[in-house]
């Protein structure tokens, strides 16, 4: 007997949850995902901040196709000169040279977690120190390095031992800023703490951390894996603040739907990876030429079409719409908006009903009573209105 895709999925695809969403996708275009029955879903989560310019953007498809005609993987990262990598690194340099006060160097990875891993090693190598500071309830990825930066006790206990020498401070608290001392290699922060429900960092908090890093020589690593690439209303969220990173992390929306991440630093900091020992950091597929071509096209679309502005306008629209129709203040910045419900059961019921009604939303890893609204930046206004009207009608029924 032939098994269905659904049965095959449950039988042969590794399961990391006992209740996967199980939407069986047929295709995706712009801000809509179509399932195998032809049902349309308006995407209000962008695959968790990945599809910032929507699904299968024509300029991204063209760039991918162009590169496919030339070459795919040739050699482990960093050995051959591959045009898609050099063009992308130069484009990033031009975008960031002023913020970094000089030339910028990018190390391309395959994922966000791997960008965090690389940045941890870079900070150790550059400072000669091994301790790290991260924020309680921040999420930086699921491999061992990033998990060591995760405060959640359940994950820590289950996967211990993790890396030693990590201390946690509270997002938006000035208490314990003195944990950042001369033993600290780097401090990891997010400008909007994503997985607690899109909590923007306060300026006083960011400035205190920035000053303490300057004072102690600890590197400031800003994780913009979710907040980057236009999502908060500026190309990178730190550009809305007075602080600047020593290392910037990108992934997710950076690739326009292809897997790529990056850690980015000044040439001076990045050069510390190139000797003692040589090949101190390696990846086979990092900076895959097809992914780099896709990422460059994606960044160009965001910049040239000024999608950052769309994030600001549509973020405000969502906030006002929800306030007007539900008397609830959403939390967040730009197109990272969340709605808080009284508990997980209510939130889950609303998310499930949204799914039945063709709207894709989600909750947060560390805030299961909050609902995530983070559509593509270029979602059509009419689709956004339709999705919000459906969401509001469903919420009214259940709260
Ligand atoms: C802020 C942040 N950092 C790091 C990561 C890890 O990225 P990846 O899933 O590509 O490893 C994520 C993923 O959700 C993230 O949201």
Image (cartoon, rainbow, N blue to C red):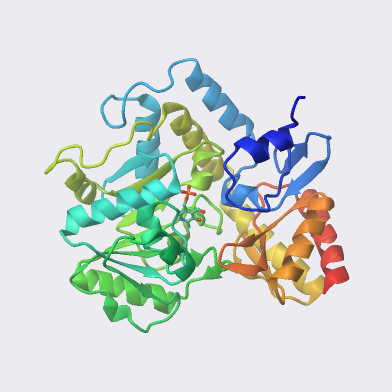
Residue 263 pos. (x, y %): 35, 48
Q: Residue at x 73, y 63 (%)?
A: 348
Residue 396 at x, y percent in the picture: 86, 70
Examine the rendered structure and indicate whether residue 388 appears above or below residue 60. Answer: below
- Mark yes or no: residue 152 visible: no
- Quadrant where the C terminus sits is bottom right
The percent position of residue 23, horizontal first and vertical second, equals: 73, 43
Position of residue 25 in the picture relative to residue 59 (left or right) = right
Outermost residue, left side: 276
Q: In the image, is 228 to the left or to the right of 99?
A: right
Q: Nearer the viewer, residue 253 or 281?
A: 281
Total labels: the figure holds 0
Residue furthest to the front in view is: 1
The residue positioned 28% from the left and 32% from the top of the image is 78
Residue at x 61%, y 53% (from the top left corner) = 17
Q: Quadrant of residue 305?
A: top right
Nearer-the-camera pick, 345 or 68: 345
Residue 156 in the image, given as x and y percentages of width and height = 42, 65
Q: Residue at x 13, y 42 (%)?
A: 277
Q: Is residue 86 left or right of residue 15?
A: left
* Quarter location, residue 195: bottom right
In the depicted structure, whether residue 277 falls above or below residue 354: above
Quadrant in which residue 89 is drawn: top left
Quadrant for the N terminus in the image = top right
Task: Give 36 or 272, whichever is nearer the viewer.
Answer: 36
Residue with the most extreme top position: 69
Decide which of 305, 212 is in the foreground and name it: 212
* Residue 78 appears in the rendering: yes
């Amino acid at each position: 007997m032939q098994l269905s895709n659904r049965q095959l999925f449950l039988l042969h695809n590794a399961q990391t949850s006992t209740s996967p969403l199980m939407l069986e996708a047929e295709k995706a275009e712009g801000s809509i995902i179509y399932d195998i029955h032809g049902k349309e879903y308006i995407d209000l989560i962008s695959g968790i901040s990945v599809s910032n310019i929507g699904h299968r953007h024509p300029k991204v498809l063209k760039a991918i196709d162009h590169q496919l005609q030339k070459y795919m993987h040739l050699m482990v990262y960093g050995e051959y000169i591959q045009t898609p990598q050099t063009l992308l690194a130069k484009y990033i340099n031009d975008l960031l040279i002023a913020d970094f006060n000089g030339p910028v160097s990018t190390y391309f990875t395959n994922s966000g977690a791997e960008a965090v891993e690389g940045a941890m090693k870079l900070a150790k190598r550059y400072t000669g120190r091994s301790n790290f500071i991260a924020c309680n309830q921040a999420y930086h990825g699921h491999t061992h390095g990033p998990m060591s930066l995760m405060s959640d006790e359940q994950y820590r206990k289950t996967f211990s031992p993790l890396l030693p020498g990590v201390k946690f401070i509270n997002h938006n608290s000035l208490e314990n800023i003195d944990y950042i001392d001369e033993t600290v290699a780097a401090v990891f922060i997010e400008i909007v703490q994503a997985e607690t429900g899109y909590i923007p960092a306060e300026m006083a908090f960011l400035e205190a951390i920035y000053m303490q890093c300057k004072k102690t020589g600890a590197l400031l690593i800003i994780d913009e894996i979710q907040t980057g690439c236009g999502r908060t209303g500026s190309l990178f969220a730190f550009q809305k603040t007075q602080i600047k990173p020593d290392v910037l992390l990108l992934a997710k929306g950076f690739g326009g739907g292809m897997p790529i991440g990056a850690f980015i630093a000044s040439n001076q900091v990045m050069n510390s990876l190139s000797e003692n020992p040589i090949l101190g950091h390696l990846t086979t597929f990092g900076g895959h030429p097809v992914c780099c071509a896709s990422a460059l096209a994606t960044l160009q679309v965001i910049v040239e079409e000024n999608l950052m502005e769309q994030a600001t306008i549509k973020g405000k629209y969502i906030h006002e719409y929800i306030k007007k129709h539900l008397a609830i203040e959403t939390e967040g910045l730009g197109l990272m908006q969340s709605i808080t419900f009284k508990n997980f059961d209510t939130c889950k019921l609303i998310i499930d009903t949204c799914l039945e009604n063709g709207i894709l939303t989600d909750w947060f890893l560390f805030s299961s009573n909050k609902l995530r609204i983070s559509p593509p930046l270029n979602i059509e206004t009419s689709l956004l209105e339709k999705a919000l009207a459906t969401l509001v009608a469903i919420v009214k029924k259940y709260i």
